Amino acid sequence: MKRFSKKILTSLLVLITGMTVHAQLPNQVFKAAGSPVNPKVTVTWNRYYDHAGISEICKKIAAAYPDLAKLQSIGKSFEGRDLWCLTITDFKKGNPDRKPGMYIDGNIHSNEIQGAEFALYTAWYLTESFGDTQFIQELLEDKVFYIVPTINPDARDSYMHKPNTGSSPRSGVIPVDNDGDGQVNEDSYDDINNDGHITMMRRKNPNGRWKLDPKDPRNMIQVGPDEKGDYELLGIEGIDNDGDGRVNEDGYTFEYDPNRDWGWGWQPNYIQNGAYKYPFSLPENRAVMEFVMKHPNIAAAQSFHNAGGMILRGPGGQEDIGTYNAQDIAVYDAIAKKGEELIPGYKYLVVYKDLYSAYGGELDWFYAGRGIYTYSNELWTPYLMYMRDATRDPFDNASYSFDRYLLFQDAFVPWKEYDHPQYGKIEVGGMKKNFGRAHPGFLLESDAHRNMAFSIYHCFHTPKLEVSEITEKDLGDGLKEVTAVIYNGRLMPTHSSQDAKNKIERPDYITLTTTGKILSGMQVENRDLNLSKEQTNNPQTIEVPNIPGLGSVTVKWIVQGGGKYTVNVDSKKGGTATASK
């Protein structure tokens, strides 16, 4: 009987392992509106992926859609991991380097993990939806996306694979002597009970200021001013590893902040906590900077962070109020207000005014340094738990209620006694690192989709140019006046005010090609009053400082002889346009 059972089991194993799992057949599924019905690249969007997982998804997307996606490494991290970039566009329709570009990255802070999934979801959705969604087809014909899922892959893997809190590490993995004692990382957090989580420590104390929450005894609440408590909180899980009388001092006293390393408004660490050696001293940030500098067609950018449900724009410091001038703020406001509609619970805020001062941030470098309209979205808001206002306070009862009734206590480590070498008998427990800042699985895809929609709206409003009019007027004696109107059908101008003011990018070129001789070229300042400004050099190609959003510029040439006219527009951030008459 045992021999017979073993044969059956062996046969079953052969049968099961020999089976090939395929995607569902088209006649087995029914399309949900707005979602790919039978994707070539199957990705489960209710979980998080380490760097190897992200690499695999990127490679699958590029392999499945060679006409829509190209994969490249834009550099290496400190530990040698690739910084993957997916270029997403319709490669059959025009040169991608000449299309207005949208740059997206995520996970600059290692614990802010969902930025990578949100960025990657955008690449996946664009490629999977292209086949049956006309809007996506038209978008990728006109625009190009540069998507770098994670720009801190080393610390992302450290966060995922090592015991951490929900907020550690925020930094990268370059060794730093945090407490200035000549040693590196000798007294950071410790998983003292070896359960794979870094949680909280508490100790019973009749003079403590904390007690069990009567609504949920897993939670701790502070007692009133005239009330005695039962517990004291001892902080994050750890021990005094180096015998200096302090616990975990190497885990929080100083960490370099990758988002204080950028080359605009940079300040040293004694002014801006978290600054490293000098701007772009981190290899990951330098790789991004070099990529952006090589792609002057990037007109819009999005950096995904967590948490708090915010759509942030600069400036990071009050000193830069004048950098963000009125014309550009009008564009920022229009796009971000639409974002508040698209992403429930998210608020449009200004960093220095509504959050805190931050110097040397990516947000400011992209806009102030490169003239690129850029947002940083702080992903996840406790509003999403019950679709009403709540806080991210770890002792907020809403979080415990949400964990109890919707996550079934999967986000909580029960309190258990532990004999601590310094504190004696204590209890260890609390929320796991995957809750509080990171989305719960069932809300991850929904919020990824909404934030992706905001990025698509942002990209859609990068410039779209057309030659809307070419007219000829006979001036006599064989001379013709040729007039062209160039229209920009999107919110963004071809040069942000910051770009135009500092001449970050070259002017837009409007060129007339004809068989005749071009005697002069000029930009029309007032067509009704016939006011124009002549360009004395190279009249064939008129240099225009800017083509406004939802606006136009008019140019004209005086031509001797000639016949057919072709007008070509060449803008670094606005793309190209051509028309003939």
Image (cartoon, helix red, strand yellow):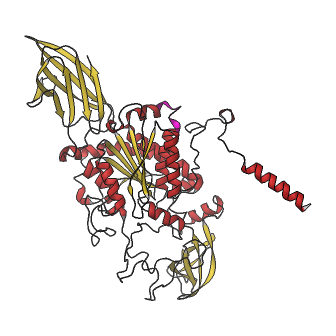
Q: Quadrant of the C terminus?
A: top left
The answer to which image quadrant residue 42 occupies is top right
Residue 45 sits above or below residue 262 on the image: above
Residue at 27%, 19% in the rendered image: 580
Residue 295 appears left or right of 405 = left
Q: Quadrant of the N terminus?
A: bottom right
Residue 237, image x, y percentages: 53, 77
Q: 145 or 22, which lies in front?
A: 22
Q: 210 or 132, which lies in front?
A: 132
- Report whether residue 233 is seen: yes
Q: Is residue 134 magenta?
A: yes
User: How many numbered markers are drawn?
Assistant: 0
Which residue appears farthest toward the right when viewing the image?
A: 1
Residue 10, image x, y percentages: 80, 55
- Report whether residue 206 is seen: no
* Range covered by the magenta-colored residues: 128-135
Residue 31 sits above or below residue 48 on the image: above
Residue 139 appears left or right of 516 = right
Residue at 16%, 30% in the rendered image: 542
Residue 107, image x, y percentages: 44, 58
Residue 243, image x, y percentages: 46, 89
Q: Is residue 129 magenta?
A: yes
Which residue appears farthest toward the top when viewing the image?
A: 477
Residue at 42%, 75% in the rendered image: 252
Residue 417 appears left or right of 302 = right
Residue 513 sits above or below residue 153 on the image: above
The answer to which image quadrant residue 569 occupies is top left
